[in-house]
Image: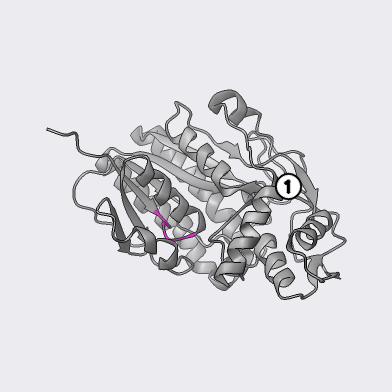
Amino acid sequence: MAQRKKIVLITGGAGFLGSHLCDRFLYDGYRVLCVDNLITGNTKNIGHLLSDRNFRFIEHNVSKEIRIPGPVHYILHFASPASPVDYLLYPIPTLKVGSLGTHNTLGLAKKKQARYLLASTSEVYGDPLVHPQKETYWGNVNPIGPRGVYDEAKRFAEAITMAYHRMHKIDIKIVRIFNTYGPRMRIKDGRVVPNFIYQALHNEPLTVYGSGRQTRSFCYYSDLIEGIVRLLFSSMTGPVNIGNPKEFTIREFAQLVITSSGTKSRIVYKPLPIDDPKQRRPDISLARKELNWEPLVPLEKGLKVTIDWFKNNF
């Protein structure tokens, strides 16, 4: 008798990263349950999977009780608004999915005896006073600022995940995701990569906030997915930073988008938003040592693919 495929449940599976994870696990021979309430996800991201007999889409808000019949072997909790535009528009759902949604998915992991991976974020570091950011850094977060709904939701999610690990012996993993880009990002989700690409493709000025000297690092989605998969199947608990340690100023990145897209756009400057981090770069020493992972796709290459995808889809 053929061995039954193991089942992976991915919350937020119709989103940018979630849909790429669905692709990866199907390719690797798993059955995939994709759960999403489509508040920011889109069925277009998983449309090519709907006819696959090893794939099932469940439209559901994980902040409410989750009922899944049968076995589940792995749970990856990626459900959450993830851009400033989204979590400022949906502040309470953002807090709920980070708290109630994490609680519910951990409860499901306990019931199914499933391995659990939490998608946390570099935002737990806030506007960091330590650079680059190691996993041992506790962060500098304004809990009552406009970004606090996302930052604190993820910090709570990490805390309750560790509590379930300590109290209920759940096999957990925590990944702290740094800026990631690639196909299937929403064109107007408020993050710098789609913002600049949209403006460039429409020959509009590229909007840089502040002086443009603030820094970010950009990891191509395929590198990130590989890091997540390695963490899931490792003996580590985490948290583990997964991102690209190569740092660019926002002004440098804007110029690269202009060059790569062939636009006639120029750069304009506007005031820096409240609590916007001035620098953000991961220390990935832990991932290098324990997961034998580091990003491989150069920004210039990944950006070209991403720009071409946006040209064909918007």
Report if residue 14 lies within the magenta region.
yes
Q: Is 201 on the left-hand or right-hand side of 306?
A: right
Residue 60 at x, y = what percent?
Answer: 33, 64
Q: Is 218 on the left-hand or right-hand side of 272?
A: left
Residue 299 at x, y = what percent?
Answer: 70, 48
Residue 184 at x, y = what percent?
Answer: 53, 61
Packing grade of label 1 (10 A; few <14, some 14-19, many >=20) is: many
Span of residues in magenta: 11-15
Q: Helix or strand or loop: what does disc 1 sit on?
A: loop
Instruction: Name the image quarter holding residue 135.
Output: top right
The residue under label 1 is 280
| Residue sitting at x 43%, y 39% | 163
Q: Is residue 106 above or below residue 265?
A: above
**Looking at the rendering, in which quadrant would you find the C terminus?**
bottom right
Query: Mark 1 belongs to which amino acid?
Result: Arg
Q: Is residue 245 above or below residue 210?
A: above
Viewer can see residue 162: yes
| Residue sitting at x 38%, y 60% | 48
Instruction: Name the image quarter holding residue 74.
Output: top left
Residue 208 at x, y = what percent?
Answer: 80, 65
Q: Nearer the viewer, residue 243 or 157?
A: 243
Q: Nearer the viewer, residue 224 or 140?
A: 224
Main secondary structure along the magenta-highlighted residues: loop
